[in-house]
Amino acid sequence: MAIKPNGKSPVTSDHDDKIMLFRDVTPGPHETQLRFRLIHFWEAWNPLKKTLIGVEMLLIDEQGSVIQGFISPSRIERHLSKMKPGSLYKLNNFYGSSNKTMYRVSDHAVTVSFSWNSELSVLEDSPTLLMKTDSVFIPLRNFKLAVIAKETSLVISVITHTI
């Protein structure tokens, strides 16, 4: 890249040379690129105020690391129309937000938040194959029954060990 006469470098929009993996995402702004497969997304609502908080997502990168994603209500219209579960995407520019453990849907302590300058596009040809995941969704009723059964057997186990 040639230096301008004033000593400054021209601004480039080529983000392909700076690709970050999920394991390297930290809190704060990032002017780099993430490549991922969208596993699933859902709306997050405030049940008391009955207002939309945003869209939560589950994302997986080429190394199989999973991270939570978030789009605020003001940015949903811009980005959500391009998104389809199972598809590959690249996201240029984002903000790493620390998340609370009680709201965390992945092991990573940071959420990838779409910011004002985020650019999302479909990743047509991935140089590294991002594994397609077969997600199995368990109905909430069955999940609750499984948890109750597990808790009941744990309580019975604890009671028998203490007697």
Image: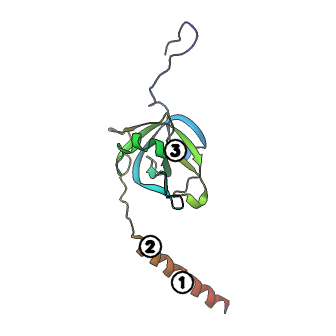
Q: Left or right of 119: which side holds 27?
A: right
Q: Residue at x 45, y 78 (%)?
A: 145
Image coords of residue 49 (percent x, y): 53, 58
Q: Residue at x 55, y 36 (%)?
A: 30
Q: Earlier in the sequence, mark 2 or mark 3?
A: 3
Image coords of residue 86 (percent x, y): 35, 51
Q: Residue at x 34, y 49 (%)?
A: 84
Residue that mark 1 sits on = 152
From what the image shows, is residue 43 above or below residue 21? below
Badge 1 marks a residue whose secondary structure is: helix
Bin the neighbour count of mark 2 within 10 Å (Cα to Cα): few under 14, some 14-19, many 20 and up: few
Residue that mark 3 sits on = 113
From what the image shows, is residue 77 above or below residue 4? below
Image coords of residue 45 (percent x, y): 49, 57
Spatial CA distance of label 1 from label 2 is 14 Å
Q: Earlier in the sequence, mark 1 or mark 2?
A: 2
Q: Nearer the viewer, mark 3 or mark 1?
A: 3
Spatial CA distance of label 3 from label 1 is 39 Å
Residue situated furthest front in the rendering: 49
Which mark identifies residue 48?
none
Which of the 4 image quadrants contains residue 107?
Answer: bottom right
Bin the neighbour count of mark 3 within 10 Å (Cα to Cα): few under 14, some 14-19, many 20 and up: many
Image coords of residue 122 (percent x, y): 35, 39
Badge 3 marks a residue whose secondary structure is: strand
Residue that mark 2 sits on = 143
Badge 2 marks a residue whose secondary structure is: helix
